[in-house]
Amino acid sequence: MATVDLFAIGNALIDQEFKVSDEFLAEQNLQKGTMQLTDGETQAQLFQNLQNSQVYKGQASGGSAANTTVAFSALGGSAFYGCRVGNDELGSVYLDGLNDAGILTSKKSISEGVTGTCMVLVSPDSERTMHTYLGITAELTDSQIDFESLKTAKWLYIEGYLSTSDSARVAVQQARQIAKDNQVKIALTLSDPAMVQYARTGLEELLDDGVDLLFCNEQEAVMYTQTETIEAALAALKSLAKTVVITLGAEGALVATAEEHIQVAGRKVTAVDTNGAGDAFSGAFLYALNAGKDLQTAAELAILISSQVVAQFGPRLAVADYPKLLKQLEVESV
């Protein structure tokens, strides 16, 4: 298998996006801004309710770590994505989409079952609320992941959503050990406040004895560390990661290591849909670090890319847009 810069493991989900009202979220008993797991029957009923009363915005291949990997690859990095899809039409659509974006996948990812789906509900304040039926990706195991290219990768990237799956956590432990044996750096994202609230033990297992790079947003940081301020949360998280990145929405991001503490301002855009913004941030940040850029530049690129994701519907930009934004930042920095 070809050598890659980034080896990522995550869920494989097809997103169905809708513009919804706050009243609809309340009627469906959904907590705004979080991800809720469900079964296939409940998912089908919600989909019907959405079609009957809300505004459909389209379908897109999603999955948190996959969105990150797309951003990384589109900016110029090489990447592999380990996941599990069903042997159905959506599974083919999903893997073909990754391959079209230049990302390597494995036939091991395909197995009997139904590909997962995520109803992405975008409220008037642009916040995304997710209702997820994991399908076969809930049963992701090491058997669906070809670890060969991890041995020569620069980074292993793990999404926190895997914390809910016993078998996926076992696969992550194997990946972590391979990474350690081959001096591959490890990055992880906490992914969602719901993971911190309901799957904390799983997240702790994914983090294990620490990582090189940890991504989270302000809410996740405070919740996970059980602190009351972002400063206290940052101090606590530095014991878990060599580099901690806390995204602050429109306010930008905080980046901290043992030696540096940087705050980078956000960019003003008209927010449309926050789905995928944090994922794009992580992909751009990882790309910049892998390209030898400093933390300040990495954060600036990540904020630029993620701000453009927020300004549109869908979790990803067109592949051609990522290098254009990279060039824009280079011009601005002259």
Image (tube, helix red, strand yellow):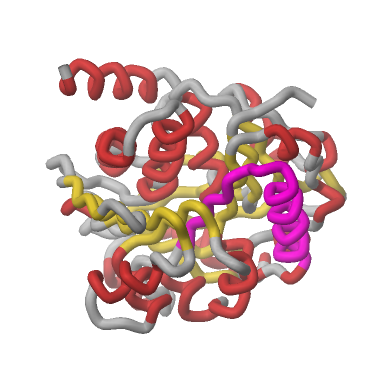
Residue 179: x and y in percent read: 69, 47
327 lies left or right of 172: left
Q: Is residue 271 left or right of residue 277?
A: left
Side of 208 where 20 appears, left or right? left
Where, quadrant-wise, is the C terminus in this rendering? top left
Residue depicted at 23% across the width and 71% down the height: 231
The correct choice, above or below, for 302 with respect to 240 in the image is above
Highlighted range, magenta: 167-191
Residue 284, x across and y down, in percent: 40, 36
Image quarter of the N terminus: top right
Q: Where 15 falls versus 74 (above or below)?
A: below
- What secondary structure is the stretch in magenta mostly built from? helix
Estimate the x, y position of residue 324 in percent, counting from the top left: 32, 18
Residue 102 visible from this viewpoint? yes
The residue nearer to you, when weighing 79 against 96, is: 79
Q: Is residue 179 magenta?
A: yes
Instruction: Answer whether residue 72 is magenta in the image.
Output: no
